[in-house]
Image (spheres, rainbow, N blue to C red):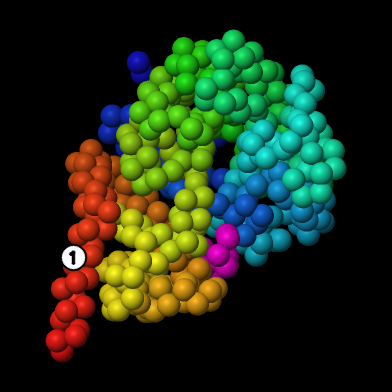
Amino acid sequence: MQQRQLCCTVDYEVLKREGLAKRARLKTVHGTIETPVFMNVATVAAIKGGASAEDLEAIGTQVVLCNTYHLHLRPGDDVVYRMGGLHRFMGCDAGRTPILTDSGGFQVFSLAQNRRINEAGVTFRSHIDGHHLFMGPEESIRIQSHLGSTIAMAFDECPSARAEEAYVRASCERTTRWLERCQREMARLNSLPDTVNRHQLLFGINQGAVYPHLRRAHARQIAEMDLDGYAVGGLAVGETHEEMYAMLEATVPELPVGKPTYLMGVGTPANILESVARGIDFFDCVYPSRNGRHGHLYTDHGRINLMNACYKLDPRPIEEGCTCPACRRYSRAYIRHLLKSGETLGLRLCVLHNLRFYNRLMEEIRSALESGRFEAYKKAKLAGFAELDGEKTDRQNYTGIANGWREG
């Protein structure tokens, strides 16, 4: 099925196609986004691991993602508003660094205890101090408006991938009604003179668990609302990779080809390559920063665990040719020492390497699409990732280097 063509008001242009894969450009009030793009996750307006705004610019970050739920609780969206919005608060370049804020919906459903869902919204307990909070579509959009992000996400319900079909159907219907309320509230707020970003964009979210017919029906329904972009939510939450890809194949062709598409919370480098092939523009995931803080590092030959003893005397950079601050100057042995010693510099260097790896991956994907060789690039890249079978190959390489060092 061909993707739906609708009149589009958002400044989004598809530059090249290869199958469903898109090389596109989204122009926003805070800068231009070249897609496909990976959004670096700054949950509480900071990347865990000590990466600064200057660091993010240096490693090629295009978009930063911040968490509405967490910023509402601490420091409070009113504080960010009084500070002039997230760009000023974080020290980000407001002309070159778009920021996306999620709706807070996923955290409400995944973190909160004793939540109560009704048509108005969700009542839940703060994970910080346990006090009761209420969040509905209007509240979520008001918080995001206070934050002044470039792109705001609609408030939705994220049911379990294994929820009963009847529940998921009713949940999709409620999510659509909530989306309509989000759209009205954003239009109202963007018309006010004291709004931080009066050009804030709104992305709607497709749901439907692992039921392809519900995914398709919900995608068709929200596609008629002429939003600025469309996300596929409720995946990477326990279903298999094959199920995730099947849901994308069912959903994406029903979304407008003239609008950006976003797969929320995904994922591994392999997930990204497979999802680009199925028409996705935007990605986000905590993997690169979370894994980096534990010494798990991405390379073109697979993932390595720098905490392993085989790297104790390894003089090589994490990856030859990488331009991140870690690889330009430091050895695997030194960074491993920092991690083992509990030095925060080790965490920072590993996080920056992983984020640079993800950003470089997206640069390569865009280049491959521009030259019409994405499918060949994808196959070669996936084969490369599989080279380190439990780090066997890397350990063999290290053994030769270590023996040479001892002999020399």
The quarter of the displayed image where residue 1 is located: top left
In the displayed structure image, the side of residue 205 where residue 317 appears, left or right:
left
At 39% from the left edge and 45% from the top edge, which residue is drawn? 268
Residue 356 location in percent, x, y? Answer: 41, 61
Report which residue position mark 1 lands on: 396
Q: Say if 148 sits above or below 114 in the image.
A: below
Q: Residue furthest bottom?
A: 408
The quarter of the displayed image where residue 151 is located: top right
Q: Is residue 44 magenta?
A: no
Bounds of the magenta span?
47-60
Q: Amino acid at mark 1?
A: Gln
Q: Is residue 249 visible?
A: yes
Residue 178 location in percent, x, y? Answer: 70, 23
Residue 229 location in percent, x, y? Answer: 54, 32
Residue 90 location in percent, x, y? Answer: 66, 62
**Residue in front for this viewpoint, 312 or 272:** 312
Q: Say if 30 sits above or below 159 in the image.
A: below
| Quadrant of the drawing holding the C terminus | bottom left
Q: Say if 179 sits above or below 387 in the image.
A: above
